[in-house]
Structures are given as structure tokens and as C-alpha cells.
Amino acid sequence: MPADLEHHHPAVNATRVRQGRWGKHVFWVLIISTVLAAAALFGAWGLRSGDLAGVEHTKGATTTQEAERYSGEQAPVRQTPSS
């Protein structure tokens, strides 16, 4: 005979059955994963911080004449959009 017919349990709807419990294990998983993610981001930033601070690797204008090619005529700021 099946076990369900012998034991009578209270009926619980499907939504309640599928919900997980919040316990200490869930809290620690969230805390540890957040700390590891922060450590990974800080480590990646730390490895690349020297490259971000230096300007030697940029390929900008090296002479005055070359820099003047990139500057355009300055225009006043428009307060209303043109139609």
C-alpha cells in the first residue's frame, strides 16, 4: 500500500512548498559571495591601476600643429533646441 494513503498530512499549496527558507546558511553564502566579488573587483582594479594612472600609452597629439587640427571654432551654448 502507498505511504501517502497511510499518513495524513495537512494540504499545502504549491507556492508555499516551492519557497525556500531563510536561514544562517543562506546569510553566510550571501556574505561570502559579496566579499569574494568585492575582492575580485578590487584585485582587478589593483592590477590595472598603474595603467589607468599613466598617460604614456595614449596616442594623442605630439606637436602643437597636430593639436591645433583637433580644435574647432567655439560656439555659444544654445538654450533652446533648434527646430
Image: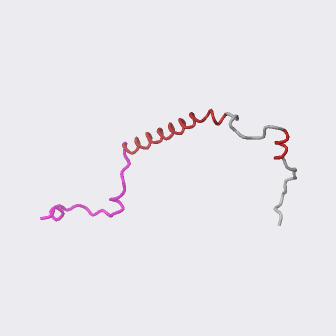
| Residue 6 or residue 59, whichever sits in front | 59
**Residue segment shown in magenta:** 1-24
Q: What is the residue that sits farthest to the bottom in this orientation?
A: 83
| Residue 39 or residue 69, whichever sits in front | 69
Side of 34 relative to 10 (left or right): right
Q: Position of residue 31 (x, y in %)?
A: 44, 40
Rendered-image quadrant of the C terminus: bottom right
Q: Position of residue 9 (x, y in %)?
A: 22, 61
| Residue 21 or residue 67, whichever sits in front | 67
Q: Residue at x 18, y 63 (%)?
A: 4
Above or below, 57 against 9 in this view is above
Above or below, 3 against 29 in this view is below
Q: Position of residue 14 (x, y in %)?
A: 33, 63
Rendered-image quadrant of the N terminus: bottom left
Q: Is residue 20 magenta?
A: yes
Q: Residue at x 36, y 62 (%)?
A: 15
Q: Is residue 34 magenta?
A: no
| Residue 43 or residue 16, whichever sits in front | 43
Q: Residue at x 84, y 38 (%)?
A: 64
